[in-house]
Image (tube, grey):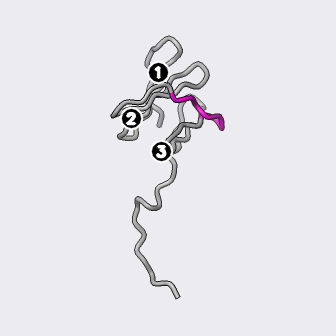
Amino acid sequence: MHKNVDQKAQAAKKAGVKHWNGMKLEMTPNSLVVDGKPAATAEETKETTTYQQGLYTFIAYKNGKLAVMDDKGVFKGYAK
C-alpha cells in the first residue's frame, strides 16, 4: 500500500514547448528540438546556451527565454 504523497510542481515540470514563426521549439534541460529535428549546440556560457538549426540561431537563457536570430545575426524576436 502506498501513502499519498504531495506532488511538487518541479517534479511535474516537462520540457518547455515554445513557438516562433510556425516552428515548434521543444526545450529540454540539455537540448533544443526544432520541428522534430535536433539543433546543434554552438556555444555554452554560464547564463545561455546557443543552438544552430537551419538558417536560425536560438539563444536559450537560463530564465526560460528563447531568442531567435537569423543567419546574418539579426535578432528576430523571442519564442512564446
Q: Is residue 44 left or right of residue 32?
A: left
Task: Using a 10 Å C-alpha cutoff, classify the residue at mark 1 as few (fewer than 14 neighbours), some (14 to 19) or many (20 or more).
Answer: some
Q: Which residue is drawn at 47% across and 45% down?
A: 29
Q: For this rendering, which residue is in front, 19 or 35?
A: 35
Q: What element carries label 3?
A: loop
Which residue is situated farthest in the right direction here? 36
Q: What stretch is highlighted in magenta?
A: 34-41
Characterize the magenta stretch by its predominant secondary structure. strand
Q: How far apart are marks 2 and 1 (CA)?
A: 16 Å
Q: Is residue 47 magenta?
A: no
Q: Nearer the viewer, mark 2 or mark 1?
A: 2
Mark number, residue 35: none
- The residue type indicated by label 2 comes to Tyr
Mark 2 or mark 1, earlier in chain: 2
Q: For this rendering, which residue is in front, 73 or 20?
A: 73
Quickly name the residue at label 3.
29
Mark 1 or mark 3, earlier in chain: 3
- The residue type indicated by label 3 comes to Pro
Mark 2 or mark 3, earlier in chain: 3
Q: Does the magenta stretch include residue 35?
A: yes
Q: Residue at x 61, y 34 (%)?
A: 38
- The residue type indicated by label 1 comes to Lys
